[in-house]
Image: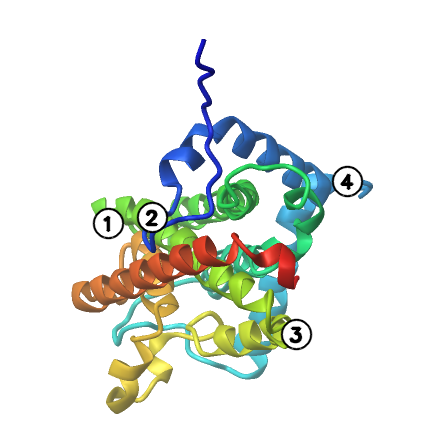
Amino acid sequence: MTQQFKTKITSKHSLFDLHLKETFEYRDLIALFVKRDFVSLYKQTVLGPLWAIIQPLLTTVVFTIIFGNLAGLTTADVAGDYIVPGFLFYMSGNIVWSYFSGTLNATSGTFINNRATMGKVYYPRLVSPISTACSHLISFGIQLAMFLVFWAFYLIRGGTSITVSPMLLLVIPTVLEMMLLATGCGIIISSLTTKYRDLAMLVGFGLQLWQYGSPIAYGLQLIPERLMWLYMLNPVTPIVTTFRYALFGFGYFSLTYYLISWAVTLVLFFIGLILFSRIERTFMDTI
C-alpha cells in the first residue's frame, strides 16, 4: 500500500514558490502563535493588557504638551478654519505609529528570535511574521477602541469640525495597508539580518527617523509646498493622513498619493516574501 504524505519537503524551489497555500493550511498554528505572543507580551505585568491603553495615552499627553503647547507645531493637514482637538490629532497618529513600529520591530527579528523552534520543528516560516502582525493587531484594536471613546466625546460635545462621513470606511483598507507595509519591511530586515547582524542594531534608530519623517507630531501644513511631492512618497504619510481624514471627516486625502502608497506597500511586501522564501531554506546555516 502506497503511503500518502500531506507535506513534502524538498530542496528545489522556484523564485515565486512562496508557500502561501501551505501557510493558509496552518491557520490553526497562526491562531495559537497569536495567543502566545499576546499573552507573553503582558505576562507577569500588574496591569496586563491595560498597558495597550496606558502607553499611547501617555505618549499622546507628552506630544500634546511638547509639540502642541511648547513647540506650537501645527496640527492642520490642510488650510482652512477646521477645528480638531490636539489631543485627538496626536492620539490618532500615535496609535497608527505604535502598531506600525511595533509590528515592524517584532517581525524584523523573526529568524533570530525563533531560531530554536525553527531548527527543530517544520512549519511554514511565514506563520511567524503573520502571527506577530495579527497579535499586534489586537493591541491596535484596543487602542482604536480607546480613541473612539474620546472621539465620540468630542463629537457629542461639539465645538469641533469633526463629522461622521462615508470616508470612515477608509479605516479598513488603511489598517490593512499598514499591516502589509509593516510586515513587508519587517521580513525584509529579518531576511537580511541573518547575514548582516548590524542591521538589527539600526532598526530602532531607523524607526525614530521614520517617525519624525511622517506626520505624527505635526500636520502637513508644516511641509513646504515644493517638497510635498517628495514627502508624500513616504508610504506611511498617506496612511496617517488618510486615517485622520476618515476619522475626522476632513483633512488631506489624495487618491493619487494613496494609490502610490499602496503600490509601494505591495512591492515591498512582495519583495519581502521572495527574500523570506529564499533565506528560510538556509538561515540555520548562517544564523
Q: Which residue is mark 4?
A: 43
Nearer the observer, disc 3 or disc 1? Answer: 3
Gap in angstroms between the C-alphas marked 4 and 2 = 30 Å
Looking at the rendered structure, the secondary structure element under dot 1 is: helix
Q: Amino acid at mark 2?
A: Val
Gap in angstroms between the C-alphas marked 3 and 1 = 39 Å
Task: Work out whether residue 116 can be spotted.
Answer: yes
Q: Which residue is mark 1?
A: 167
Nearer the observer, disc 3 or disc 2? Answer: 3
Q: Amino acid at mark 4?
A: Lys
Where is residue 116 drawn, in percent x and y?
Answer: 71, 47
Q: Which residue is mark 3?
A: 201
* Residue at 30% in and 48% down: 173
Q: Amino acid at mark 3?
A: Met
Q: Amino acid at mark 1?
A: Met
Instruction: Check disc 2: other Cα within 10 Å, few if <14, some if 14-19, many if 20+.
Output: some
Up/down of 91 relative to 197, above or below: above
Up/down of 227 relative to 112, above or below: below
